[in-house]
Image (cartoon, grey):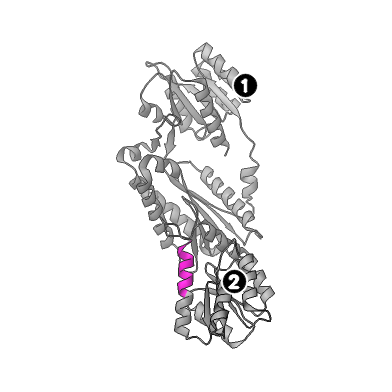
Amino acid sequence: MLSKLVVIIDKRKELPAKYKKLVENNGVSVILTPNFEEGMELLTSYEPDLILISDSMDTPLANNIKKLRMLSYPSRPCIIAMSKSDDLKDKLDVLDAGADDFLSEPIESEEFKARINAHLRRHFESMVDEITRLPDTKSTLKTLKRTIIENKKWAAMLVRINEFEAYKEIYGELASDKMLQTYTAIINSSLDENDFLGELSQGEFLILTNPLKAEHVASFLVYAFEAIVEKFYSEEDAKCGYITLYGDDNAGKRVNLVSSSIGVISSEYQPYISVNAALTALFATCKLAQYSTSNTSSSYLVERTKLSADDAILNKEFNNKILIIEPDEALNYLLKTTGEMQGYEVAAVQDYDTAMNLVKTFDPALIVLDAGDADTMKGLELCKKLKKDNHFKDKKIILSTIIHDKRMVLNTGADLYLPKPYELLGIFNWIEQMVKEFNY
């Protein structure tokens, strides 16, 4: 993988070949070109990390460096000038034009390597995440772009930690940082020097590897992450299998323990021509992996010839149906009427015994379910039944209740504990959020 790339612009024959050999020995890929215009094209397409340019071109060295610097402003590579001149004015002109260093030829091989290594080290240290010590988003996307342009066989893997932000909110930055560092170490242990690992965002990693090993890596990561998940939680939360958020906006919401979803795409099955196309397929495949099994467990999905991740995710019809199961006639009517005014397709029932059949026929995205009185608690039993049924377990359920026992309510599988009495605006804010979660 072209994770570290140097472009040498030099029309001579022997010295550029020598420089190339010296740099490549330090684990860096090198592209040679004797033509300045071609060097400008390489700069645009590959966004190299460092450019070596000599004064062997037909145009002045300072002018060439000024053009390179202007063209490379977004990617900001190191630019090093090579010249037979040792004149102070020539050095100052080149440095003022935008060069990061000026090397006078001839130069000893060891000094040359040391200088190049120093510049590359500083360059990459500026693009490393402080927590994971992995290449940051900009550097990661640059490597993906080079991999696509190189047009060789490759596989890309999007590795995501689901519910990471909720975990961070409850357990704090130190615990969430430890989780990221641990998973980073696990991922690194499954890769070799020919693979690439970088960050797309906090809790999202990109792996570039060989298509032949991608599925084996994904399988191992799912197994390894599942084996360590509970170690990041308190004994009580690990036993329950979920956490609850705090604060006025989120109090009572049930959040699953973290899991890992992995989407894998490969150039073997589809010719990706841009970073955006590859990322779109990766995110869609990763999301499909997340929802192909229970949301509480880790999973991976590999793109196959017959699988279109775009179709599988993006063409899903939006479900805006909500089902109200509320014995109180006045509140039942109020919720139904307000829901219809908000644009939802609403069905409402007061009787628990007929509710199950209505869930089957109406097929809602979300159910607002009253827990029942303290003696019978029919709503709690219905919630347990729905969440244990594979056909209905993914339905979002808001349990409204006069029973002020959050743990008991959420242990039924409900997605939100909502104590009565509640504000109408508050419950419909939750309805909007959870209907979106169900669909996306």
Q: Main secondary structure of the magenta part?
A: helix
Residue 247 in the figure: left or right of residue 92:
left
Residue at screen point 54% across, 64% down: 212
Q: Quadrant of the N terminus?
A: bottom right
Q: Are marks 2 and 1 in contact (CB under 8 Å)?
A: no
**Residue type at numbered disc 1:** Glu
Residue 97, numbered label: 2
The one nearer the camera, 81 or 185, is 81
Residue tagged 1: 340
Q: Nearer the viewer, residue 271 or 179?
A: 179
Instruction: Look at the numbered disc 1 and give the secondary structure of its residue.
Output: helix
| Residue 296 forms part of the magenta stretch | no
Q: Is residue 30 visible?
A: no
Q: Where's residue 70, x and y in %?
A: 63, 65
Q: Position of residue 152 (x, y in %)?
A: 61, 68
The local crowd at label 2, few if under 14, some if 14 to 19, many if 20 or more residues have their Cα within 10 Å, is some
- Which residue is painted at 35% across and 48% down in the image? 174
Q: Which residues are magenta?
A: 117-126
- Give the tally of numbered discs: 2
The x and y percentages for residue 126 are 47, 62
Q: Amino acid at mark 2?
A: Ala
The extreme top residue here reads 330
The crowd level at tag 1 (other Cα within 10 Å; few <14, some 14-19, many 20+) is some
Q: Hey, which quadrant is residue 239 in on the image?
A: top left
Pinpoint residue 207: horizontal percent, then vertical percent.
51, 59
Query: Residue at horizontal 38%, vertical 54%?
Result: 182
The kind of secondary structure element at disc 2 is helix
Vertical order, 193 against 167 (above or below): below
Counting residues from the start of the chain, the first of labels 2 and 1 encountered is 2
